[in-house]
Image: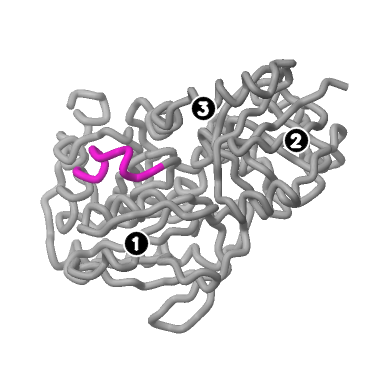
Amino acid sequence: MLQARLLLQDGTLFTGRAFGAEGEKTGEVVFNTGITGYQEVLTDPSYCGQIVTMTYPLIGNYGISRDDFESIRPYVHGFVVRRHEPVPSNWRAQYSVDDLLKEYGIIGISDIDTRMLTRIIRHHGTMKGILTTGNTPVEELLEQMNDTTIEELRNQVPMTSTPHIYSSPGSRERIVLIDYGAKSGILRELNKRDCDVVVVPHDTTADEIRRLAPDGIQLSNGPGDPKDVPHAVQTVRELLGEYPIFGICLGHQLFALAAGADTEKLKFGHRGGNHPVKELESGRCYITSQNHGYTVNEASIQGTELEVTHINNNDKTIEGLKHSKFPAFSVQYHPEAAPGPQDNSYLFDRFLDMIREHKINHPKQPRQAEFASAVKGEF
């Protein structure tokens, strides 16, 4: 059995068994507390650039099904588990986790103390790590890791966003989904409601979006620091007030920045499928799926036109915002969670209700010719 090693930036070394691909890869070491959903974690673009540790001890027992991918391919930089099950037992399984990681060049490590690793991250915060199946000395690995600049881990949005515009036709409201690394679940929820969805790259300008004649704009989730994509903040700022806007996860943070608030990095982030969130207006608690390392700074809300709508019951961080003047709102968590709690899919209905109300109050003439031209790439 091939050996693998995980070396943290503070010098902590874990040695275990390798599975998946061979090689070396640097990334931010994080943990996810989900009991199920390892396939959706692997294929969630928000994990781009990260070495993901699963706290649940048994991973791989139900295999991999292409039907359950949350994007076209996995984007994680490494996968860390306590026990890897190489032979899945599930009638839907098409192949194993090992097969998936080998296909996409992702290194896996098993048979290490994931509880200890998680406690280190919780105490010291997320940090860089390097995962290797080679025999490079620890001193050289530390030097190599320290030479990996932060900038090299901050190009995740361009790596995960669609490079081209495409559409998923429907007969109702036209939604422009700005893809910052979108999960497939967002598109599925909009398709369920028969929306006419046009997916555009992360760097699409406000004028290009206007030419698509949208009824509303969906800001997707995505990886990394929202301040690494200032062009996205500018685009949202230009569109704010002109169209109804709904932001999810990274889209929530971009909406906050566009409205004048600020964001900051969490110590170890929120990653799992059971985070309790309180809706302030109703007092109701929702169980949510989350995956983010940044949050909106509460003090920065003062002096803006934003209102806090949801808070995290664990650490009281902001989980939802709305604009007091314009038809726009956002949540930090994932209402399209798959797998995960279904408590929050109503937010997509709320978005469509907002669009319909806005259309009544601000009727516009259809611009089909411009839309057809834009979809053909004639911006």
Instruction: Please tell me which residue lies in front, 334 or 79.
Output: 79
Assess whether residue 229 is covered by the magenta stretch. Answer: yes
Identified at 59% across, 40% down, the residue is 29
Label 1 belongs to which residue? Answer: 297
Give coordinates of residue 170: x percent, y percent.
38, 46
Calculate the distance from the C-alpha at mark 2 to the C-alpha at mark 3. Answer: 18 Å
Identified at 43% across, 59% down, the residue is 332
Assess whether residue 47 is covered by the magenta stretch. Answer: no
Secondary structure under tag 3 reads helix
Disc 3 residue type (three-letter): Asn
Left or right: residue 266 compared with residue 321? right
Identified at 24% across, 24% down, the residue is 377
Label 2 belongs to which residue? Answer: 14
**Marks 2 & 1, CB-CB < 8 Å contact:** no
Q: Which residues are magenta?
A: 225-234
**Picture disc at residue 49:** none
Secondary structure under tag 2 reads strand
Label 3 belongs to which residue? Answer: 146
Residue 223: tell me if it is visible: yes
Badge 3: residue crowd in 10 Å (few <14, some 14–19, many ≥20) = some
Disc 1 residue type (three-letter): Asn
Q: Is residue 209 above or below residue 333?
A: above
Q: Quadrant of residue 262?
A: bottom left
**Marks 3 & 1, CB-CB < 8 Å contact:** no
